[in-house]
Amino acid sequence: MENLIKFKTIPSTNLYLKENFAKLKDRTIVLADHQTNGRGRLQRNWKDDDDLLFSILLKDNLKGNITNLSLLAAASIYKTLIKHLENVKIKWPNDILVNEKKISGILLESIISSKVDCVIIGIGINVNTRDFKDDLSKKATSLFLETSVLYNKESLFEELLRDFFYEYELYLQEKSDYLNICRENSYLIGKNVLLMIDEKTKEARVLNILDNGNILLLIDGKEVEMNYGEITLTGVY
Ligand code: BTN
């Protein structure tokens, strides 16, 4: 087992690793029952209600395109969830959906000095959530809501870690099939989307996910490659 640090309540497992990475080992995992300041992409908050909330610290072997680690995590979460659920899709770059509703989000952060010092992969999974507040109920789901089964969070966590590190070992040997898993189970490929690019709304068709982790779009009849820092998806249809 990798190094595991558990908290009952903490502001954010990602933040904890960002502040403490220097004294922690590669593959340290921080798990929390609750977060008071759970962070999501695009400055969004992550809710805190019967979820699995954890972050994985990677310090060694950080070569190549580190943003692909978000897709690697998505593929490994997919592999875990598909054992329990049907209709699991990966929504590039960092969400997992079940029946078109979000069940898991990934927040990849890194600390870069003269080199990449560390990558932190934060993962939130809605496990036994029974209801979502307000608007969220239309957009989010949980394992419980999909299956009517109350899950043992500890064993699911162990399964997720086992699947992640299995895939990560393959990734280090350049043998992981994670990109194909993301393509074959993509929620977006083949769909039309609305994007915010440089504060302008654009319509596009999603063509593919490229080997470098970027998305290939058809915008105004032209193929355009973009990374996830460059665009915000505002609609899918
Ligand atoms: C997103 O959907 O925008 C990403 C959500 C990531 C949430 C997880 S919960 C555990 C880890 N700690 C955080 O503060 N965020 C991530």
Image: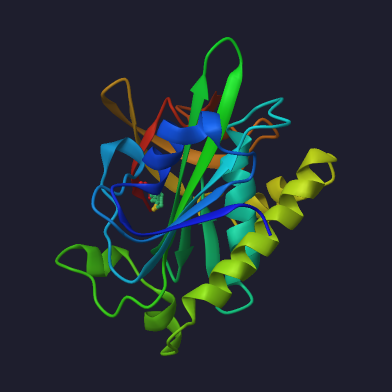
Residue ID at (65%, 50%): 183
Most foreground residue, 210 or 34: 34
Tell me how many marks there are: 0
Left or right of 158, for residue 128: left
Residue ID at (68%, 28%): 62
Q: In this rendering, is residue 158 above or below 32?
A: below
Residue ID at (25%, 47%): 37
Left or right of 41, for residue 98: right
Quarter of the image where the N terminus is located: bottom right
Estimate the x, y position of residue 88 in percent, counting from the top left.
54, 68
Q: In this rendering, is residue 142 above or below 66?
A: below
Most foreground residue, 45 or 231: 45
Estimate the x, y position of residue 56 in percent, counting from the top left.
55, 47
Left or right of 7, for residue 223: right
Picture quadrant where residue 7 is located: bottom left
Q: In this rendering, is residue 58 above or below 62?
A: below
View extreme (bottom): residue: 148
Q: Is residue 231 visible?
A: yes
View extreme (front): residue: 23
Residue ID at (63%, 32%): 59
Estimate the x, y position of residue 97 in percent, counting from the top left.
46, 63
Estimate the x, y position of residue 220 in percent, counting from the top left.
45, 27
According to the image, what is the colour scheme of the structure?
Answer: rainbow
Q: Is residue 93 visible?
A: no
View extreme (left): residue: 134
Left or right of 177, for residue 16: left
Most foreground residue, 223 or 214: 214
